[in-house]
Amino acid sequence: MKKDESFLGKLGGTLVRKKKAKEVSDLQEEGKNAINAPLQPSSTDIHPEDTLLEENAERTMLDPTSRDDSKFKELLRVLIDWINNELEEERIIVKDLEEDVYDGQVLQKLFEKLSGRKLNVAEVTQSEIGQKQKLQTVLEAVNELLRPHGWALDWSVDAIHGKNLVCIVSLLVALAMHFQAPIRLPEHVSVQMVVVKKREGILQTSHVTKELTTTTEMMMGRFERDAFDTLLDHAPDKLNVVKKSLITFVNKHLNKLNLEVTELESQFADGVYLVLLMGLLENYFVPLYNFFLTPENFDQKVHNVAFAFELMQDGGLKKPKARPEGNYIILHIHEVNFSSSLLDLLFCLFVLLTEP
């Protein structure tokens, strides 16, 4: 009799487990249908954990149509190239942001490189607890840096470790903009997010738009303004006096090559005059194969300006505030700050050459 009761008990337990397993399977299927229905056609893979929600809980995920958006793909490519360039000395190669960034190792190294600050974290962490602890330390340092500047901190330890691509991208864009990364972020990148909520046992879905980048002008407008920016805004007449003095200074040297400048912004935009000016100021010949004397496209102009920056640093100047990206020599990539950055560079050269 006991054997029969034991057998029936086991049988009953097996049936209960099968019933629970079927409930879980049905719930997963319900979640997939709820998510996929408004997204037709959709071939995305929905993780089971994305649909298993507690009552009143919600989860957000990237709409599969946004994942294939050309601008979003371009943003991912730019960010990956930037990270790999920054961490080249660390021999770290990122191929996929979701798979290579979630554990905190890349974010730690990137933040340390950009900020010049060493974080007190373990170098290698394999366990989930260790990875989240590292992420916590890294994100605390990032948030401490960005919060005073008004950034929306749209990321968390759980989101990053959960491979939330939108949160990862938002964090990287914020870091790139704050540290004035020499990259050109694509403008007006937005993605659709699917929000899944559970109400009274039923999964409900909705869509929200998440803006990742705006215009270049607005993004670069976060950077510090200098004395030339102030002059441009409040005393343009005095600024014109400064510009005339700098034109006289530039022509004093470029005239040796039978070159003359009448308009700083347009004639210096492709970097050619900057390269030639550095050679004249430092008394050396710049081989023509090192730069493009008649640049034909954007990349060649950026190359010229970047090369001129290297020559300036070799000549004793600090790393220029301006960036070779954007409209060539522009830091903020709009007309006002174009003038500011160019004048800042030429003024530094003027001071360097007139110091005793």
Image: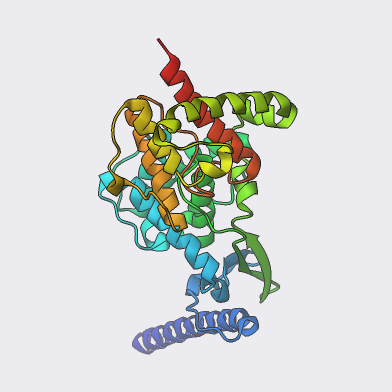
Which residue appears at 39% of the width and 37% of the height?
276
Residue 216 image point, x, y percent:
60, 51
Task: Answer with the quarter of the image where residue 234 lies.
Answer: top right
Which residue appears at 30% of the width and 49% of the height?
125
| Above or below for 330 versus 299 | above
The colouring scheme, among rainbow, by chain, secondary structure or one colour, is rainbow
Residue furthest toward the front? 258
| Above or below for 122 versus 280 | below
Quadrant where the N terminus is found in the figure = bottom left
Q: Which one is in front, 356 or 260?
A: 260
Which residue appears at 43% of the width and 36% of the height?
258
Residue 227 image point, x, y percent:
62, 25
| Above or below for 307 versus 8 | above
Q: Which one is in front, 2 or 240?
A: 240
Tell me: 72 left or right of 301.
right
Tell me: 227 left or right of 250.
right
Q: Which one is in front, 300 or 116?
A: 300
Image mark count? 0
Residue 10 image point, x, y percent:
39, 84
Residue 312 image point, x, y percent:
38, 31
Q: Is residue 270 visible?
A: yes
